[in-house]
Amino acid sequence: MPTRNDEYLLYQILIGVWPLRADTASAELCERLKNYMLKAAREATQSTSWANKNLEYETALISFVDSVLDPAANQEFISDFLTFQRRIASIGMMNSLSQTLIKLMSPGVPDIYQGNELSEFSLVDPDNRRPSIMRCDKNSCANYCLSGFRAKCQKNGRPNCKRFRY
């Protein structure tokens, strides 16, 4: 069984990386989460570490991640989780659009890098080392909204900059 901190971290990470409109975790997401949790536990050096690996703890941690994400064994948790996650995701999308509006409509050059136009649900190492996929996923509401929102702002131009002067 993982420590309370590791369990809490898993729940936080699930909220952040859960794919929009998904009812279950894909095999790829399960693998990504297991790799991330193992790395996080080793770097925390509480129950295991890179120098002194506790294989018993690491095996229990991986098994816990698997059990949490197993829809057959954990349907009640997944149902409750999805209700909460979808609420948080919609609030997060509105925050993202609000920040993008401010960024695009403020004076100066918007700080948007190639690849940042689309939603990205990557974690840190080793997850962020996956190959980049530069395509717009039309099934993703956030990607569709953000791309359309950005195009609309660019088409309509920026407001008169005098409004932003003190």
Image (cartoon, rainbow, N blue to C red):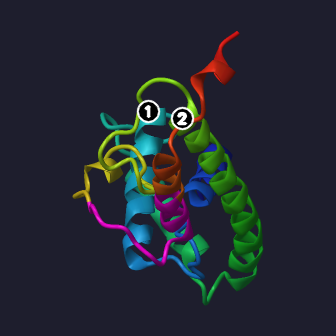
Q: Secondary structure at mark 1?
A: loop
Q: Are marks 1 and 2 in contact (CB under 8 Å)?
A: yes
Q: Position of residue 45 (x, y in %)?
A: 46, 33
Q: Residues within 10 Å of mark 1 (few under 14, many from 20)?
A: few
Q: Is the residue 140 above or below the residue 162 in the image?
A: below
The image quarter containing residue 85 is: bottom right
Residue drawn at the location 33% of the way across and 44% of the way down: 125
Q: Is the residue 156 above or below the residue 43 in the image?
A: below
Residue drawn at the location 54% of the way across and 34% of the way down: 103
Q: Position of residue 92 (x, y in %)?
A: 66, 52
Residue at numbered disc 2: 103
Q: Nearer the viewer, residue 1 or 93?
A: 93
Q: Position of residue 145 (x, y in %)?
A: 55, 63
Task: Judge left or right: residue 17 versus residue 86.
Answer: left
Tell me the amino acid under the disc marked 1. Pro
Q: Is residue 135 visible?
A: yes
Where, quadrant-wise, is the C terminus in this rendering? top right
Residue drawn at the location 56% of the way across and 29% of the way down: 106
Q: Secondary structure at mark 2?
A: helix
Tell me the amino acid under the disc marked 2. Lys
Q: Nearer the viewer, residue 125 or 48?
A: 125
Earlier sequence position, callout 1 versus callout 2: 2
Task: Judge left or right: residue 155 versus residue 127.
Answer: right
Residue at numbered disc 1: 110
Part of the protein shown in magenta: 133-148
Q: Is the residue 147 above or below the residue 47 in the image?
A: below
Q: Position of residue 135 (x, y in %)?
A: 30, 66
Give the CA distance from mark 1 to mark 2. Answer: 6 Å
Q: Residue furthest bottom?
A: 72
